[in-house]
Image (tube, rainbow, N blue to C red):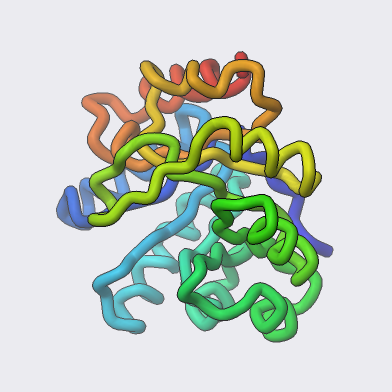
Amino acid sequence: MRPKFDLSLYLVTDSSYHEEPEFLRRVEAACRGGVTIVQLREKNRSSREYYTLACQVKAITDRYGIPLIIDDRVDIAQACGAAGVHLGAADLPVSVARRILGPDRIIGATAKTVAWAMDEKNQGADYLGVGAMFPTATKVNTVLTPVSVLADIIREVRLPVVAIGGLDAENCSVLEGIPVDGIAVVRALMLADDPERAACELRGRAEEL
């Protein structure tokens, strides 16, 4: 059976900011503070390195009963027993990932237009990541998504949606009045002075939207 998931506060990791022990400490602190789902995103590791880190992060998320999502890599998600995978435009199609992973894994997909989002839904996506809402340092060429498009996707596609891209406790008010299911953050937790406290604050802000 597919795990239940709560998108309220979605942590997308970036291990490039810290040595591994500090990275893992921050992930755990964020989980203690209120993160509801974690996506491990590693763009520059070998398959073995990605798998090894995924197993370590999964040990943390399992302790807190939080689903672990693997970015891009269906094979890594399968190998480490993650709850699911998140796929972008350059990754395997959702329909192919669903065929490989079966009906019991969570599959998220990136979408930037209503038509794109509808296609991902029809292929079997469980939720959508929509953005970027603001410029972000995690991608060189950030394509911003207007809040109006986010609202259109939520209204037309009727899948759970998490907003992503440069969001933090100060600017997520831009989403007020939009029935988004959660906010995804990277630097707001990966670079926070106190990740646990920051997660607690962000969780509160997310639930006010």
Q: Quadrant location of the N terminus?
A: bottom right
Q: Position of residue 28 (x, y in %)?
A: 40, 42
Residue at 35% over, 42% down: 186
Eyeballing the image, is 74 above or below 188? below
> Relative to the observer, which residue lies in front, 92 or 3?
92
> Relative to the observer, which residue lies in front, 19 or 172?
172
From the viewer's perspective, tell me whether residue 80 is left or right of residue 24: right
Residue at 65% over, 43% down: 161
Res 191 → quadrant: top left
From the viewer's perspective, tell me whether residue 164 is left or right of residue 125: left
From the viewer's perspective, tell me whether residue 180 is left or right of residue 188: right
Q: Residue furthest right?
A: 1
Q: Position of residue 97 (x, y in %)?
A: 65, 79
Residue at 33% over, 83% down: 48
Eyeballing the image, is 82 above or below 156? below
Observer able to see residue 200: no
Observer able to see residue 173: yes
Q: Position of residue 202 (x, y in %)?
A: 46, 23
Res 2 → quadrant: bottom right
Eyeballing the image, is 47 above or below 195? below
Q: Position of residue 113 (x, y in %)?
A: 60, 52
Q: Quadrant location of the C terminus?
A: top right
Residue at 29% over, 38% down: 187
